[in-house]
Image: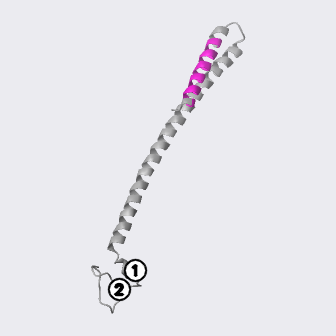
Amino acid sequence: MSRGSRTLIAMYVAVALWLSFCTVRTWGAVPLWTTLAMAVASLAPVIGVVRETVIADERRTVAALREREGRRAARRDATAAALAQAEVEAACCERWWTSCATEHDPGCAHRTSWGTTA
């Protein structure tokens, strides 16, 4: 939970307590409908606290999913790098590439006769 969320929750709790205190203090001294309105208003900050906790849970879930996807992407990148390295290692010698497949290095494992291009 972020610092801003904690601050909002503390403010919501303080407002809810203050409104509850005012509700109790005005009970019987003012018309009943105003006391009930104050009681209902004291419940509104509770909704804010619930909202902030739900948002914090969603942020944690999104962070976990992003981390998991990052690990998957890293594995895919490592697999692609290994595949590319294997392709490079399986390729023929440099002279074969630069000479348009007409000659090989003396130690090339893919060395074939001069008559073929591969």
- Residue under pointer 2: 103
Residue 19's quadrant in the figure? top right
Where residue 37 appears, x then y in whole percent? Answer: 68, 19
Asked if residue 52 is positioned above or below residue 40 in the image, the reply reads below
- Residue under pointer 1: 97
Q: Main secondary structure of the magenta part?
A: helix
Tell me the crowding category of disc 1: few under 14, some 14 to 19, or many 20 or more residues within 10 angstroms, Cα based: few
Residue sitting farthest toward the top: 29
Q: Is residue 50 visible?
A: no
Where residue 80 appears, x then y in whole percent? Answer: 40, 63
Quadrant where the image shows the C terminus = bottom left
- Residue type of the residue flagged with mark 2: Glu
Of the residues under marks 2 and 1, which one precedes in the sequence?
1
Where residue 5 appears, x then y in whole percent? Answer: 56, 30
Q: Is residue 89 visible?
A: yes
- Residue type of the residue flagged with mark 1: Trp
